[in-house]
Image: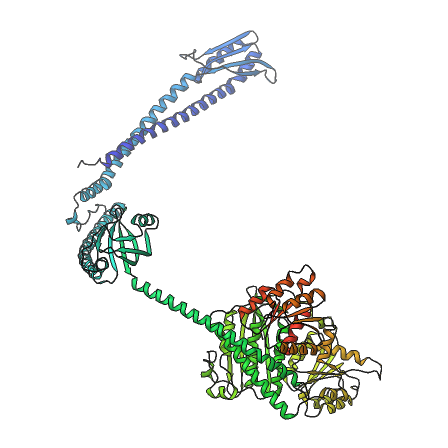
């Protein structure tokens, strides 16, 4: 290795070069300075000469003494800066030349005027030239002298600097270089040489840094050695682990139930097969070939798919056994890349699924058999429903008509038993049909517009009779913010509410049953919350957890005491879940229960304005007297929504004690439960109070009031008699009519206002109805019911007659039986819809003994608007007529 160039020598060369450049620069600056100094000195000599001789020469010239002037000019030799001088006076010129001066040099003359003594008149002028050559010689001499001195000084300084660098820098650095050059792994612990300078400087830090670097390098080498040893140890362990894993893999491949192998990607040759795969290919002890192992699909097709997907999972492969028989398998294939990264082989894992396919075929056959059995069961239940409902229709219809005739107490008791037994049987049939339908997965939900308030009113009417038989009040409280028009399945909503109401009535002996309905927005839809409160026997916690399972009731004795199949709540749970909600219960034994459910509905089309919305009762005052909190809450809510000012009392005895300043109400609504006294006495007591003589009274009576009770109330002074449950849609019309009758002149007849009278006023001039029914018994029942509802009825005994009657007459609605001779109801409906006249759009309501969803869909598909299942009850028929004759469509529902 060559020795490095000495730093001191390099530094000396550069210092000398810099000294030379600096000497030249300083010499130039000194020359400039000398030039300026000498130029200034020459100018000063010239000015001194002019000051010394101008006055005397001016005098000599003024006196024309040219000899004296010439003599004075010779004295200019005392001013070496003046090269020559010419004195010009008129036509006479006096000259001076510097002895030994170079008169040929380029020096311009400087003119100076000479003025007459004591006058400013110019009598002569000077032309003086300065000695430029003398100036340059002086400057050059001074520059050489200065340059020599500076150069000498810089050379001496460079020598001293070189000696200092040689001692303090070069030698220590050379020692460090020599130390580093001789350094090796064995001598890393030898410290770097320190400079001789007592005061520490950068070279000391450099030496320490080298020593520290040596120490760190030694530590790193130690760590590297340790890491190498650790890597070697781990490599040995990995080799052992790899060997173990290889043995385990071999063991797994040998023992695994699934076949595994490796296939050549190009020609499809089976390169490796584990025992399971070999046993699949060779099941009879014969030998197998590696090239013919796949029956279907073709290997090129699999290669084409592997080229794009690299892995195929759950592929159906048919293997070819050694004897040529096929074997169904499920396989996964994945590409194994070679050393160059290109695909060369394919990993194959197969599973024998021949037994599974056989089991699946058996399951499919079993499922088809179960489906056929389920269809047979459904058909059987439908046929049985039709066969049972037809006689039940006659029994219930005539029993309901017989109830309105004059019967003795024993006959009434027998009739009530008949109606109760039929109702129980009908409820059990409906439960069994619904449960069978749900279990068969045939539950289909409708999506049609309906009026929630009308639906709940009609539902309460269905249970009103049973509730009042047990002296129970049924009250429905609906949040006024809920829109009237909703979209969903109203028949299923009614079914849930009706089931919960029937249960509440069944298990409650006294008090009231309250239905509360509210809603909240949820993702552009409406979630409806309904709860049914009662104060019945209650349910313990253990039973609550099982209550919504099939065939479960509160306890075994419940079934014996109260009856029922135990399917109702299970059906309710299924229906609520199908409509995006849930159902639950909170209950305390001996206190009562609160059943609650929620449904997810859409906002339906805008419903036409109800009749009572055109009645203005704003500002009127109403006094409510009722001992039932639920009734008070219902009346306060509805009257408040009408803009009326309300006041309420819990008993009639508190009326005389009202504050004297309290205003007299415009109307008083009196609940029959607010006093134990007869209705006639109640009216007399109120009208006897000061200021109350002319106030109209509305009596809220029980649904099962005795005959003659309404006329007795009218005779006692009541203006209106309304049976519970109270219909919010009828109350405004009742109040308005009571206030109108109060304005009639004294002595003029004032008829009693009843629920039927208000309903008749709201549905005045009901249209003509066409009944298409072939069964004489059903004809008679339907005609009597329709006439009782104030309808005019024409009867057709088959579908053909119904079409002909519709073409010749004007009807507002057709009640169409589905099963009739000559032409059934479906064909007749399609014929009506095909008429080339506005009559083709007439509402048609189906009447059928089949109550399943398929039958309903068939009716709607034929063009019918609504669906009523037999036996048809009076309240159900009335609700259907009100829906279709009230000016808006209503949902199809089954009762």
Which quadrant: the N terminus?
A: top left
Q: Quadrant of residue 362?
A: bottom left
Image x and y of residue 133, in percent: 41, 16
Q: Say whether residue 303 is visible.
A: yes
Q: Say whether residue 486 is visible.
A: no
Image x and y of residue 249, in percent: 21, 59
Q: Which of 390 and 728 lies nearest the eye of the viewer?
A: 390
Q: With respect to residue 265, does 91 lie above or below? A: above
Task: Say which residue appears at 61% left-offset and 68% top-offset.
Answer: 822
Would you say 275 lies left or right of 638 here?
left
Q: In the displayed image of the protein, which residue is found farthest to the front? A: 822
Q: Which of 747 and 617 lies nearest the eye of the viewer?
A: 747
Which quadrant: the C terminus?
A: bottom right
Q: Quadrant of residue 355?
A: bottom left
Task: Say which residue appears at 24% left-offset and 41% top-offset.
Answer: 169
Image x and y of residue 798, in percent: 63, 70
The number of discs equals: 0
Q: Which of 401 and 890 lies nearest the eye of the viewer?
A: 401
Would you say 1 lies left or right of 383 here?
left
Q: With respect to residue 608, does 337 lie above or below? A: above
């Amino acid at each position: 290795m060559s020795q490095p160039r000495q730093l001191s020598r390099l530094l000396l060369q550069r210092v000398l070069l810099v000294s030379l450049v600096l000497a030249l620069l300083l010499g130039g600056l000194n020359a400039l300075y000398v030039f300026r100094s000498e130029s200034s000195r020459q100018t000063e000599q010239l000015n001194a000469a002019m000051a010394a001789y101008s006055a005397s020469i001016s005098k000599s010239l003024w006196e024309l003494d040219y000899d004296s002037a010439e003599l004075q000019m010779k004295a200019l030799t005392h001013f070496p800066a003046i090269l020559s001088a010419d004195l010009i006076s008129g036509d006479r010129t006096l000259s001076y030349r510097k002895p030994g001066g170079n008169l040929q040099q380029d020096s311009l003359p400087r003119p100076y005027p000479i003025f007459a003594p004591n006058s400013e008149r110019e009598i002569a002028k000077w032309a003086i030239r300065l000695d430029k050559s003398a100036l340059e010689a002086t400057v050059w001499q001074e520059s050489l002298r200065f340059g020599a001195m500076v150069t000498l000084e810089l050379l001496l300084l460079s020598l001293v600097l070189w000696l200092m660098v040689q001692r303090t820098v070069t030698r220590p650095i050379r020692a460090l270089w020599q130390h580093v050059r001789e350094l090796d792994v064995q001598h890393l612990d030898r410290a770097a040489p320190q400079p001789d300078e007592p005061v520490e400087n950068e070279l000391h830090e450099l030496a320490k840094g080298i020593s520290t670097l040596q120490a760190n390098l030694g530590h790193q080498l130690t760590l590297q050695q340790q890491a190498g040893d650790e890597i070697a140890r781990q490599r040995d362990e990995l080799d052992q682990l790899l060997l173990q894993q290889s043995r385990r893999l071999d063991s797994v491949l040998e023992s695994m139930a699934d076949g595994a192998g490796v296939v050549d990607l190009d020609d499809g040759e089976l390169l490796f097969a584990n025992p399971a795969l070999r046993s699949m290919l060779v099941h009879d002890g014969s030998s197998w070939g590696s090239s013919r192992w796949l029956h279907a699909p073709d290997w090129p097709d699999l290669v084409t798919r592997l080229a794009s997907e690299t892995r195929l999972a759950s592929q159906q492969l048919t293997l070819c056994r050694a004897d040529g028989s096929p074997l169904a398998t499920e396989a996964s294939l994945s590409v194994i890349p070679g050393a160059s990264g290109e695909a060369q082989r394919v990993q194959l894992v197969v599973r024998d699924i021949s037994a599974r396919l056989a089991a699946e075929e058996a399951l499919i056959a079993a499922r088809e058999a179960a489906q056929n059995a389920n269809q047979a069961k459904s058909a059987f239940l439908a046929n049985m429903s039709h066969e049972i409902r037809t006689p039940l229709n006659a029994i219930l219809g005539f029993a309901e008509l017989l109830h309105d005739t004059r019967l003795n107490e024993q006959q009434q008791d027998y009739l009530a038993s008949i109606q109760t037994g039929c109702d129980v049987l009908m409820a059990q049939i409906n439960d069994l049909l619904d449960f069978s339908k749900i279990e068969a997965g045939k539950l289909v939900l409708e999506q049609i517009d309906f009026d929630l308030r009308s639906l709940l009113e009609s539902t309460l009417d269905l249970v009103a009779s049973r509730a009042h038989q047990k002296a129970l009040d049924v009250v429905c409280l609906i949040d006024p913010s809920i829109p009237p028009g909703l979209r969903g399945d109203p028949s299923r909503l009614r079914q849930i509410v009706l089931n919960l109401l029937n249960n509440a009535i069944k298990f409650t002996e006294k008090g009231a049953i309250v239905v509360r309905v509210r809603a909240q927005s949820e993702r552009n839809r409406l979630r409806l919350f309904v709860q049914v409160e009662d104060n019945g026997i209650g349910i313990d916690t253990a039973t609550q957890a099982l209550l919504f399972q099939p065939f479960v009731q509160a306890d075994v004795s419940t079934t014996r005491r109260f009856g029922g199949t135990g399917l109702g709540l299970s059906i309710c749970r299924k229906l609520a879940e199908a409509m995006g909600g849930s159902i639950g219960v909170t209950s305390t034994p001996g206190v009562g229960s609160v059943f609650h459910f929620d449904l997810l509905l859409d906002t339906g089309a805008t419903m036409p304005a109800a009749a009572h919305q055109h009645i203005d009762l704003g500002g009127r005052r109403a006094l409510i007297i009722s001992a039932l909190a639920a009734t008070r809450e219902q009346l306060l809510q509805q009257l408040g929504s009408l803009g009326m000012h309300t006041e309420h009392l819990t008993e009639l005895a508190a009326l005389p004690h009202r504050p004297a300043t309290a205003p007299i109400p415009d109307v008083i609504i009196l609940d029959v439960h607010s006093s134990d006294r007869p209705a006639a006495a109640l009216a007399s007591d109120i009208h006897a109070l000061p200021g109350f003589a002319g106030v109209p009274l509305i009596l809220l009576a029980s649904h099962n009031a005795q005959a003659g009770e309404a006329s007795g109330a009218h005779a006692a002074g009541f203006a209106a008699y309304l049976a519970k449950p109270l219909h919010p849609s009828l109350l405004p019309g009742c109040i308005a009519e009571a206030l109108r009758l109060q304005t009639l002149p004294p002595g003029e007849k004032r008829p009693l206002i009843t629920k039927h009278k208000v309903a008749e006023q709201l549905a005045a001039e009901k249209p003509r109805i066409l009944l298409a029914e072939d069964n004489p018994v059903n004809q008679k029942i339907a005609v009597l019911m329709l006439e009782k509802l104030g309808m005019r009825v024409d009867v057709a005994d088959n579908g053909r007659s119904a079409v002909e009657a519709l073409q010749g007459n004007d009807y507002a609605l057709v009640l169409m039986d589905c099963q009739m001779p000559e032409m059934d109801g479906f064909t007749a409906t399609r014929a009506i819809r095909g008429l080339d006249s506005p009559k083709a759009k007439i509402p048609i309501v189906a009447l059928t003994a089949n109550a399943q969803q398929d039958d309903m869909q068939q009716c709607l598909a034929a063009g019918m608007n609504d669906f009523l299942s037999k036996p048809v009850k009076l309240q159900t028929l009335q609700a259907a007529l009100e829906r279709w004759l009230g000016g808006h469509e209503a949902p199809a529902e089954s009762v």
